[in-house]
Amino acid sequence: MSNELMHALWGSFSVLNEYRTTRVAEVLSDFRTLQYYIAAVPTEPANMEDYYTEGWAALRQCSLDGQHILNCAADTSVPQASGGPLEQEKAELKQCLLDAFARRHECQKIYLRQAAAQRWMSNRDSILQGARPNGRNQAHLSACDQQLRIELTAIADESIYNELQASDYSMGRWTAEDPNLRSVQRWLRARRQ
């Protein structure tokens, strides 16, 4: 291989590693923003009689899940790459991207679950109109609870992955080496509570 070709390949690796570094930073920024939103949502009702209702229980679980994904350890086991320091940097960046990508994915799922619980809260408040649950509003409250269960069940990994991918595309982000959904799910399964 000629020196010119080697120099061109070396330059290509260097440019790609810059793209990889930028991509990791973008995904980590998204993750941080989602964490901020998750932490800002209340987890306890004004009236403690509502503490064990479905929506408030969902909000508390979202808060716990948000803390877990923030606190779980990163996978620092990066395979030794042959081919020199740029190949090693590539391997490390790809591992960092998977870590950040999976965390962002899980935070998006938590954020969507919180949004469903907040809609539940709003619907419940509209039904109660300042009153407490009673026989006259029980059927409406049960329907509100059922709607929450339906919305929570509809939040699926595939749709979250596709929504995040579409958002990345629309922002013109470099996504050529993004991990696939199966890799994200495998990373998350390894870190379940």
Image (tube, rainbow, N blue to C red):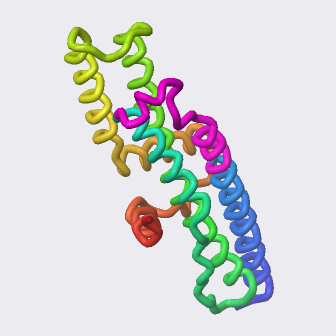
Is 40 in the magenta? yes
Task: Tell me where residue 167 sits by quadrant.
Answer: top right
Task: Give the left or right position of residue 92, taking residue 124 as reference.
Answer: right
Write the residue at 49% across / 47% down: 165
Q: Is 37 located above or below residue 93 in the figure? A: above
Report x, y in % for residue 101. Answer: 55, 58
Provide the residue span drawn in magenta: 31-53
Is 151 in the magenta? no
**What is the number of callouts on the image?**
0
Extreme-front residue of the structure: 49
Q: Is 95 located above or below residue 19 in the figure? A: below
Task: Tell me where residue 113 sits by quadrant.
Answer: top left
Q: Nearer the viewer, residue 37 or 1?
A: 37
Report x, y in % for residue 152. Answer: 33, 39
Report x, y in % for residue 180. Answer: 44, 62
Task: Give the left or right position of residue 98, taking residue 190 as reference.
Answer: right
Q: Nearer the viewer, residue 78 or 68?
A: 68
Task: Give the left or right position of residue 67, taking residue 143 as reference.
Answer: right
